[in-house]
Image (tube, rainbow, N blue to C red):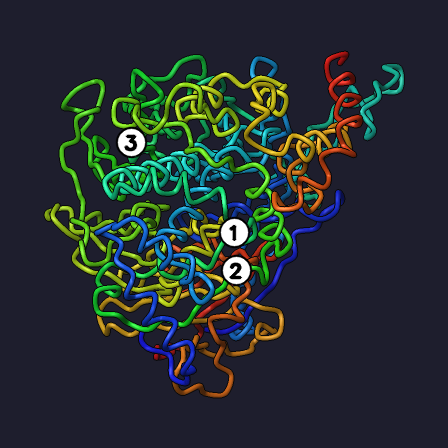
């Protein structure tokens, strides 16, 4: 892809600004600020990479459960996740993302991942590629919106469960089990031993403190028999930012819901 | 290329049941079979050329329709087994009947297609409706005579090859020995004898002892057209393995490994996904292989394992959109590819109902569109162009206006003539090249 003629001045500046962010040498404070400021224009490489990671994990779990999921697709996505996690570990950004995520607003999670599409060669040369926002046009336009909101409520601040436990024991103490984000191992085991209660399985080990339980259960309640995808798609739009205001009013509802689930 | 015929696969069930999932010419090109998502097979037959109307060169008309596979339920896993026909392969014709293999995710079936255009009349013991005659009314003997009747095409299932696969079958390929065939799923390849349904031989098994270690799957496989001991299979990591069945019973060790080293400067998180081979086809000569990955088609020489001898860009303008295509799952679309009869031109599908042809000799390529508007009978297909910025000509399509729901995954080329079959969702297009048209 060559340069696109007619790139606006502001876009030019944005791209240059983003280019300035180093992804190899992670200096801590400086880069956090740079990143936060950067995504007002074009999100940084790290944010995009995180977004890709989140997207991949959601994809792995949003397999059509009525029919056996496509093994090739699952393997390719799993390999992508491994790649990202390896790179993040090498970068040392793993810990950084943990502390960062807490303060961020939800919708920025699924950000323009334009930079990721560029090869490393292009990035080095600083080729200007037009900013390409998340593809919503023809294919399931609304789903991408829902996905970003899903990630806000569901993607917990802590890291996805590590694939290579020996590498990441430090960053992932036992109590930080991201139960919703199963390890790839479990996913492949699931593919082998399909059980009918897949949706329930995923939510059964819910760790309350890490994401908005209200949203999850509300979503489950409003659907009787649904495929996995549908359940997550019908989540009401909520962001973690305003969850506090909803908390109190939903507590009674929460008890009620838990009661029903336990009975069933 | 001239627009010739458009067939819409009719559906009684409504939308979705009739998306064409495979297209295959038989060995003479007289018959064309399509399989769809609803488990049905439709066979088209080419009308013989008429001397009176030389321009009315053989059109394809519906010859037979039958339900090949039905939806099933796997009780052990609590999962549905789709009836969608993944592949159809014709057997070489050995007598008056035609035979084909059709497969869904789990079960392969052998179908025999026969014609009946005569029936015996003048029985002694039964009347024309088949009722037994009252013997007292029979006064003389007659010899039954064959009388012509309206053509009736009968399709019967002759063999059902079930329970051979744990994973989803992605390819079947009939051996040149005409006695055996292979079926490949994500992790294993089995060899069957066409006459034996209760067992098969496993010839490739790449399932790791621990499923957690799984990083690569089989994506396609094919027997060599002339050497009955050779076959190739492709993987999700972009490699091809040529195996020789004479070497050992289990062909886990390849005879040749074809792999192009990755260009480190082009590396991204999507490199592996776009390198995954979605289809592999031997050339008619048997000397080359054609592979399709997400953005390119490549020609490999069997004698050179290090890299392909030719690489053609199908839609390189998508390279900067890979993330979006990953998000909407389009990056996992499996496009097929095809050789023409003389192995000089290769063809593959793309998005927006476009398909591409590459002439290996002239190095010219063309983009054509399979759509109702441009395909009225006898209409000449107009080459299309996708513009990626810069000067835009009239009738160019910009990358951002491409319709990614209109994908041409399945294409087939007549074995000897310049006739192609293109499956665009639930429509089948057949194009013929009446005059040698030039490619741009």
Could you tell which of marks 1 and 3 lies nearer the N-terminus? 3
Q: Residues within 10 Å of mark 1 (few under 14, many from 20)?
A: many
Q: Nearer the viewer, mark 2 or mark 1?
A: 2
Mark 2 is surrounded, within 10 Å at the Cα level, by few (under 14), some (14 to 19) or many (20 or more) other residues, namely many
- Circle 3 residue: B177
Find out whether the residues at labels 1 and 3 contact each other: C-beta distance under 8 Å.
no
Q: Residue at x 57, y 27 (%)?
A: A209
Q: Position of residue B7 (x, y in %)?
A: 63, 58
**SS class of the residue under badge 1?**
loop
* Same chain shared by disc 1 and disc 3: yes
Tell me what residue is drawn at x 40 percent, y 19 percent. Answer: A174
Res B222 seen here: no
Determine contact: label 2, label 1, CB under 8 Å.
Answer: yes
Tag shown at residue A135: 2
Chain name for mark 1: B
Q: Nearer the viewer, mark 2 or mark 3?
A: 2
Q: CA distance from mark 2 to mark 1?
A: 8 Å
Q: Chain of mark 2?
A: A
């Amino acid at each position: 892809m060559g340069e696109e003629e007619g790139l606006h001045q502001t876009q030019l500046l944005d791209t240059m600004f983003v280019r300035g962010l180093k992804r190899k040498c992670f200096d801590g404070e400086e880069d956090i600020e740079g990143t936060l400021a950067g995504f007002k224009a074009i999100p940084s490489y790290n944010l995009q990479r995180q977004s890709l990671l989140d997207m991949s994990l959601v994809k792995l779990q949003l397999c059509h459960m009525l029919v056996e999921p496509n093994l090739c697709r699952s393997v390719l996505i799993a390999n992508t996740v491994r790649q990202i996690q390896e790179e993040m570990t090498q970068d040392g950004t793993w810990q950084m993302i943990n502390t960062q995520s807490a303060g961020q607003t939800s919708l920025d999670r699924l950000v323009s991942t334009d930079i990721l599409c560029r090869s490393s060669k292009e990035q080095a040369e600083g080729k200007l590629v037009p900013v390409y926002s998340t593809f919503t046009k023809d294919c399931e336009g609304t789903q991408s919106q829902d996905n970003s909101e899903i990630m806000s409520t569901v993607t917990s601040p802590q890291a996805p469960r590590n694939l290579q436990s020996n590498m990441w024991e430090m960053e992932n103490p036992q109590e930080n089990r991201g139960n919703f984000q199963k390890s790839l191992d479990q996913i492949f085991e699931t593919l082998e031993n399909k059980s009918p209660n897949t949706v329930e399985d995923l939510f059964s080990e819910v760790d309350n403190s890490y994401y908005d339980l209200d949203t999850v259960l509300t979503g489950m309640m409003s659907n009787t028999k649904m495929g996995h995808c549908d359940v997550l798609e019908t989540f009401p739009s909520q962001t973690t930012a305003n969850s506090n205001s909803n908390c109190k009013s939903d507590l009674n509802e929460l008890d009620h819901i838990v009661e029903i689930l336990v009975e069933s | 290329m001239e627009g010739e015929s458009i067939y819409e696969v009719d559906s009684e069930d409504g939308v979705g049941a009739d998306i064409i999932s495979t297209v295959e010419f038989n060995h003479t090109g007289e018959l064309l079979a399509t399989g769809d998502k609803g488990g049905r097979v439709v066979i088209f037959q080419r009308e013989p050329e008429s001397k009176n109307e030389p321009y009315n060169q053989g059109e394809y008309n519906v010859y037979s329709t039958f339900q090949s596979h039905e939806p099933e339920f796997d009780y052990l896993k609590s999962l549905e087994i789709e009836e969608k026909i993944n592949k159809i392969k014709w057997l070489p014709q050995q007598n008056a009947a035609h035979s084909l293999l059709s497969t869904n995710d789990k079960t392969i079936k052998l179908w025999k297609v026969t014609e009946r255009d005569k029936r015996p009349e003048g029985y002694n013991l039964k009347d024309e409706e088949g009722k037994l005659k009252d013997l007292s009314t029979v006064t003389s003997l007659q010899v039954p005579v064959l009388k012509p009747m309206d053509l009736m095409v009968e399709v019967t299932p002759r063999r059902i090859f079930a329970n051979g696969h744990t994973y989803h079958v992605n390819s079947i390929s009939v051996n040149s020995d005409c006695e055996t065939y292979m079926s490949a799923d994500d992790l294993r390849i089995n060899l069957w004898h066409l006459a034996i349904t209760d067992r098969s031989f496993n010839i490739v098994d790449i399932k790791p002892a621990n499923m957690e270690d799984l990083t690569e799957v089989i994506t396609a496989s094919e027997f060599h057209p002339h050497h009955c001991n050779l076959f190739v299979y492709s993987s999700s990591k972009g490699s091809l393995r040529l195996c020789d069945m004479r070497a050992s019973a289990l062909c886990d060790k390849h005879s040749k490994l074809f792999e192009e080293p990755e260009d480190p400067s082009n590396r991204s998180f999507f490199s592996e996904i776009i390198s995954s081979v979605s289809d592999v086809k031997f050339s008619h000569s048997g000397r080359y292989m054609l592979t399709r990955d997400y953005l390119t088609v490549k020609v490999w020489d069997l004698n050179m394992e290090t890299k392909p001898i030719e690489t053609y860009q199908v839609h390189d303008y998508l390279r900067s959109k890979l993330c979006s295509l990953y998000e909407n799952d389009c990056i996992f679309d499996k496009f097929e590819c095809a050789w023409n009869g003389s192995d000089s031109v290769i063809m593959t599908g793309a998005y927006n109902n476009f398909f591409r042809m590459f002439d290996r000799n002239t190095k010219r390529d063309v983009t054509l569109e399979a759509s109702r508007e441009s395909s009225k009978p006898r209409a000449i297909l107009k080459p299309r162009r996708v513009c990626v910025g810069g000067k835009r000509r009239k009738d160019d399509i910009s990358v951002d206006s491409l319709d990614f729901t209109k994908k041409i995954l399945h294409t087939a080329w007549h074995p000897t003539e310049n006739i192609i079959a293109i499956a665009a969702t639930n429509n089948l297009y057949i194009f013929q090249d009446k005059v040698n048209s030039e490619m741009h």
